[in-house]
Image (cartoon, helix red, strand yellow):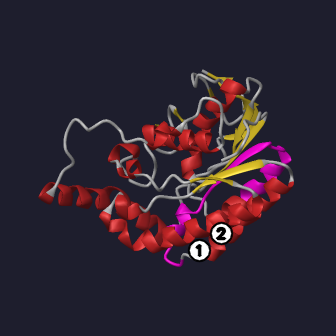
Amino acid sequence: MPDTDAAYSRYVALGDSQTEGLGDGDDVTGLRGFADRLAEHLAHANPGLTYANLAVRGRLAAQVHAEQLAPALALRPDLATVVAGVNDLLRPRFDADHAAHHLEAMFAALTAQGAHVATLTFPDPARISPLARPLTPRVIALNERIREAARRHGVTVAETGHYPVVTDPRLWSRDRLHASPIGHQRIAAALAHTLNLPGADDTWSHPLPPPAAPAPTGWRAATDELRWTAAFLGPWLTRRLRGRSSGDGRTAKRPRLGPVRADGTESVSKGGDVQR
């Protein structure tokens, strides 16, 4: 964790669907997500903060590198978040070294320009969905390489996967791939705490209050798994077989630096103009 509180004036977020904000709002009302929430936290201590979000859903680490690094450098951030790699994990021919190479290239370029870079490690998906157990070794391998690359470049790492709370279904959207609004809030709080931002603490890692109803077991749990497979896993696999991505034809929601409200009551359009 950084030793001193830092003042930031330009925050740029790079990444895929999590950074774009899927699971926290929708394409009609607008997406918020952990990066927007972190920007709002930053704005409390830095009223003049400007913020850009270059993330696009479905992007692999190599695509984030190829498409987002140059625009990010042009914005000259003093704080950047780089969060990518989950889409790589889900590909049949996952290569942890290949994905980490592109992440490290972004770490190196951004820190060389003077930006403070933050990233995070990923939770074991098998702790969220039993069907995801084959991904466990991949997550472990990618997390190890993220930590190694971060050490080499002085990148701050939020270890979000270590705590039991990450297995709470309430932190995840129905597709189990994207965080829910409360999950995005916890990710933002984890980054704020790891960055030692004013007002941040470790409460993001604490368990949620007990749920109103117990989690399903037995045949009900099995039925839920089958419904999830039909509603989310099946369509995802179909897109992969057809060589398609959920991000096809999409561009960054916030490609230019713009002001951000500390209270989260305003959002920013693609053009960078504040709208209610």
- Extreme residue in the left direction: 219
Q: Can the viewer see residue 33?
A: no
Residue 124 is a magenta residue: no
Residue 213 location, x and y as percent?
19, 39
Q: What amino acid is at disc 1? A: Ala
Q: Which residue is mark 1?
A: 96
- Foreground residue, 221 or 235? 221
Residue 127's place in the image compared with 136, above or below, is: above
Q: Viewed as shown, does residue 189 lie left or right of 136?
A: right
Secondary structure beneath dot 2 equals helix
What's the CA distance linking mark 2 and mark 1? Answer: 6 Å
Residue 233's place in the image compared with 74, above or below, is: below
Residue 10 location, x and y as percent?
78, 37
Residue 66 location, x and y as percent?
74, 62
Q: Which residues are magenta?
A: 66-93
Whether tag 2 and tag 1 are in contact, CB under 8 A, the answer is yes
For disc 2, the neighbor class at 10 Å (few under 14, some 14 to 19, many from 20) is many
Residue 219 location, x and y as percent?
13, 59
For disc 1, the neighbor class at 10 Å (few under 14, some 14 to 19, many from 20) is many
Q: Which mark is residue 100?
A: 2
Residue 88 is a magenta residue: yes
